[in-house]
Image (spheres, rainbow, N blue to C red):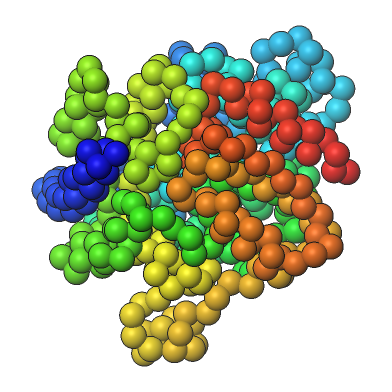
Amino acid sequence: MLQEMAVHGWLLVISVLVIVTVSFASSKLQGVSQHNNVAASPHSICSGDFSFTKGYRCQDYDVITEDGYILKLWRFREGRTKESQWEGRKKQKQPVFIQHGVLMNGQCWFVVSHADQSLPLVLVEHGYDVWVSNSRGTTFSQRHISSNNLSLPANYWDFTWSEMASYDLPTFLNFVYLETGQKVHYIGHSQGTTMMFAAFSEWKVQERVKSATMVAPVVYLNHMPFGLVDVLAKAYIGEIAGSFGIPDLNIMTEPIGTIVRALCNVPGVDCFGWIVSLFTGMNCCMNASTVELWFGSQPQPTPIKNLVHWAQGVRKQVFGKYDYGDPATNLEHYGVPEPPPYNILKMPKDFPLFLIYGGGDLLAIRKDVHILLNKLGPDRNIRELYIDNYAHLDFLEAVNAKDLVYPDIISFMRGIR
């Protein structure tokens, strides 16, 4: 027992050092390359041989936010079975919008061994018109209409999940509404749930969304156990990195990404068991091929400012806007000296909400989900699913999610008219 605690302690120290080192290294590499990773537009998963999407075809869309970020949106509406194709011909399909979490992009939903393990593809086969987003700063959404913004990394990466809630979500959802003429069923994971709860405080979400399935919902961080996330937050690692002018964290910046993948492929080195689980909790049900696929596209970059915003949630135990650190700057941005909290009670009481969470999750902790439920209050249209041995990534990548999670999501959506 003592030996195991000592190993975990050293892993914490090593992980903190790795994160700080990677932040410095990625910042230097981006500076040398004139930050080409932001300006680049990589090939889409919707072109080529469709092997990444298990043979399913999709369409690419670029949408532009009010503050100038160019974001990628993928649409899946062609099933492969005769039943799904017939279902699609009978009537207009119901759109479903799927939003990924922090340090991930839209590819995270497809890094599984088989099509029946991928939530978007399962939904397509059940007759839904599926839209998969890519938030600003991730691989396929690293463009901006302003060349000045692209040439200055500090400008480009000056955002947190608050801007994603205020700008990205309405841009995506308005576009889907214009294309389909229908409100969507929303499915968010991790930061994708944070964005949606914040959005309800900012604009009339219910005009574009008919239900929300919140998978591993992260809103309140009051019961964060001692671990890597808690240490990083309370040691002000993000603020320290930001003070050195480091704009973003990109663990997979080359050649660091190659080194990380090589280390994770060494026999006996369990990246998910040793490292990723320090963030997410011990994911119970991912197989080896899924882990290998995951490291092919994940983790994704995110602003240091976004990590600081998360750390503020851990330290202050408030679901609120980004704190600039002094009353004058907060006053300039918000009109008040303290960052205002989000008002989740602006979500209509009859709005259909499905909360899905697990007992092994170190980010969407069960006690904090209960705080969210208590703050939402009674007489809500809320459904819950709790899986005791699931951690943060199991909901996306577990081999048995197709049996334990996805049927309940489909049942929930089908029950809404």
Q: Is residue 220 above or below residue 110?
A: below
Q: On the image, which quarter does residue 3 sit in?
A: top left
Q: Position of residue 253 (x, y in %)?
A: 22, 39
From where the camera sits, is residue 176 visible?
no
Name the one closer to the observer, 309 or 285. Answer: 285
The structure residue drawn at horizontal position 36% and vertical position 77%, both measured from the top left corner, is: 324
Q: Quadrant of the N terminus?
A: top left
Q: On the image, which quarter does residue 240 sit in?
A: bottom left
Q: Position of residue 230 (x, y in %)?
A: 35, 58
Q: Would you say 243 lies left or right of 105 here?
A: left
From where the camera sits, is residue 89 visible?
yes
The structure residue drawn at horizontal position 38% and vertical position 49%, both measured from the top left corner, is: 137
Name the one closer to the observer, 184 or 231. Answer: 231
Q: Quadrant of the C terminus?
A: top right
Name the one closer to the observer, 135 or 280. Answer: 280
Count of numbered labels shown in the rendering: 0
Q: Is residue 108 above or below residue 51?
A: below
The structure residue drawn at horizontal position 24% and vertical position 25%, both measured from the top left corner, is: 269
Residue that lies at the very extreme toward the front in this rendered image:
1
Name the one closer to the observer, 401 or 66. Answer: 401
Residue that lies at the very extreme toward the top in this rendered image:
82
Q: Position of residue 303 (x, y in %)?
A: 33, 56
Q: Position of residue 322 (x, y in %)?
A: 43, 71
The structure residue drawn at horizontal position 44% and vertical position 66%, both measured from the top left corner, is: 313
